[in-house]
Image (cartoon, rainbow, N blue to C red):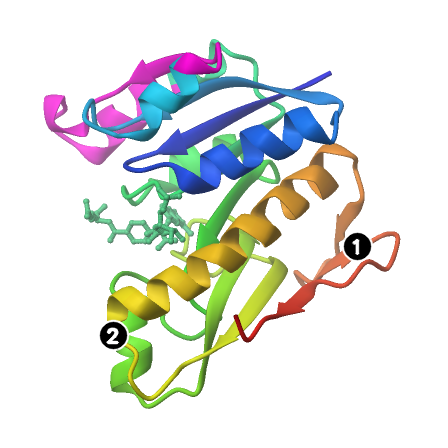
Amino acid sequence: MKNIVILISGRGSNMEAIVHACAQEKWGARIAAVVSNKASAGGLAFAASHGIATEVVDHKQFDSREAFDTELARVIDQHQPDLVVLAGFMRILTEGFVRHYEGRLLNIHPSLLPAFPGLHTHERAIEAGCKLAGATVHLVTPELDHGPIVIQAAVPVRADDTGDTLAARVLRQEHQIYPRAVRWFVEDRLTVSADGRVSQLDGAPQVVWSAD
Ligand code: NHR
Ligand code: GAR
């Protein structure tokens, strides 16, 4: 049984999708803990109501990113994770933290990387006149939003989209691809080549398109 620790900062809908898929599809894994850097994160109540351990490590209580990340890693490691999943986690992580979890740290980013790393992705995609937007699951490396790509989902950008309407369309696809990627990881069905390309060993599609 593999242990998954999920990090959130807010609503936690991607975390919920992973919790549901893990239970319904009977993965050989359990969600060992959900950890938030904000006590107000809505997702903590969902996790607790599903019998999952919850932890809060408030970044505002620390003088530096290093001090925060050291405590965050201490709390995470108490749950002996095989995999750490960033699901709407909003703090940039230090190189030391990322190295500690190298090869077992996943993120979902709401753009088609390498376009639009960082924040406010949907507004930036609309502003740039993009006709296609989406989300990317990637392994986390010290350079923000630049790690090996596991799976991507693409959706159209519509002429009347706002950041919010586009975010909602992308989020529906996030809920499809993130559980799938986590399951592949848990089942050892991913390999990363020396040049940082990720393959799915069964040849399952690593891209999803949706016009919905
Ligand atoms: N850390 C590293 N080293 N590498 C990555 O790829 C990371 C990471 C930490 C988080 C998620 C990420 C995203 O998918 C992620 C990937 C937060 C920020 C940010 O600017 C940027 C990207 C991501 C998460 N955070 C501000 C900060 O000062 C705070 C913003 C806020 O609190 O609203 O840390 O987009
Ligand atoms: C998701 O769209 C996720 O991709 C994005 O925040 C949302 C979190 O929603 N992540 C980032 O922007 C990381 N910087 P959720 O809390 O409901 O999963």
In the picture, measured across the screen, residue 86 lies left or right of residue 17, that is: left
Residue 2: numbered disc: none
The residue lying at 66 percent from left, 24 percent from top is 23
Question: What SS does tag 1 mark?
Answer: strand
Q: Earlier in the sequence, mark 2 or mark 1?
A: 2
Residue 162: numbered disc: 2
The residue nearer to you, when weighing 97 against 15, is 15
The residue lying at 72 percent from left, 58 percent from top is 194
Q: Amino acid at mark 1?
A: Gln
**Region rendered in magenta:** 49-73
Between tags 2 and 1, which lies in front?
2
Q: Position of residue 56 (x, y in %)?
A: 27, 18
Q: Is mark 1 within 8 Å of ligand 1?
A: no
> Up-down: is 33 above or below 158?
above
Q: Position of residue 123 (x, y in %)?
A: 25, 73
The residue lying at 33 percent from left, 88 percent from top is 159
Q: Position of residue 2 (x, y in %)?
A: 69, 20
Label 2 CA crowd tier, 10 Å (few <14, some 14–19, many 20+): some
Q: Position of residue 68 (x, y in %)?
A: 24, 26
Residue 200: numbered disc: 1
> Up-down: is 86 above or below 37?
below
The residue nearer to you, when weighing 35 against 209, is 209
